[in-house]
Image (cartoon, rainbow, N blue to C red):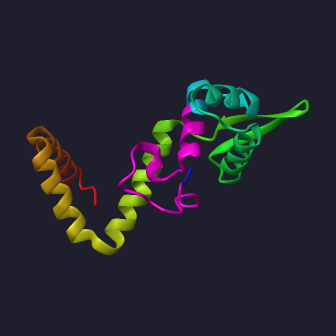
Amino acid sequence: MTVKQYIGEFRPSKRGLGKVLGHLEAAVMEIMWRQGEASVRDVYEVLLREREIAYTTVMTIMSRLADKNILQKEKKGLAYVYRPACSRDDFARSVVTEVIDGLLEDYAEVAFSHFVNRMCEEDEIKILELERIIQERQRRGDR
């Protein structure tokens, strides 16, 4: 799965899925990853416990997520049943890959420098792990 088609705007100041999805899209996806499979009605009922929301709004959001290939939908009787197209971890991995590849394409030196500086500020153990990964790749001859 690639997120290229639905990362319209990367919002670094937002938290979690809000960096790449709208607020309601993120809420729907969290529900979908927890439940695995759900109808619009199922998701609507969960969201309704947290906020006032129209059924048609949930239906529109889920339909858009299916159009973006984030959800898969299957007709069962008169309704559609939706499933996540990938796991939350795979989605996150795809987002990270897309964002970092985009940064490295145009700003590799600045991105590397910031990454290393940030790692040093956060935790010395992270820098040691990065060094280990680099050394391991050099030993294997990975490029």
The outermost residue toward the front is 52
The part of the image, by quadrant, that contains residue 35 is top right
- Is residue 117 shown left or right of residue 107? left
Q: Which quarter of the rendered picture does the C terminus lie within?
A: bottom left
Question: Visible in this render: residue 131?
Answer: no
Q: Measured from the top left, where is residue 34 in percent x and y?
A: 56, 26
Q: Residue at x 11, y 48 (%)?
A: 121
- Is residue 95 shown left or right of residue 12? right
Residue 102 belongs to magenta span: no
Q: Residue at x 69, y 43 (%)?
A: 62
Closer to us: 32 or 23: 23
Closer to us: 1 or 110: 110
Span of residues in magenta: 3-30
Q: Measured from the top left, where is residue 51 in percent x and y?
A: 59, 32
Closer to us: 71 or 60: 60
Question: Visible in this render: residue 94?
Answer: yes
Q: Measured from the top left, where is residue 73 in percent x and y?
A: 75, 40
Q: Residue at x 74, y 34 (%)?
A: 40
Q: Which residue is drawn at 52% across and 59% down?
A: 7
Q: Measured from the top left, where is residue 83 in percent x and y?
A: 67, 35
Q: In this view, does 56 lie above or below 45?
A: below
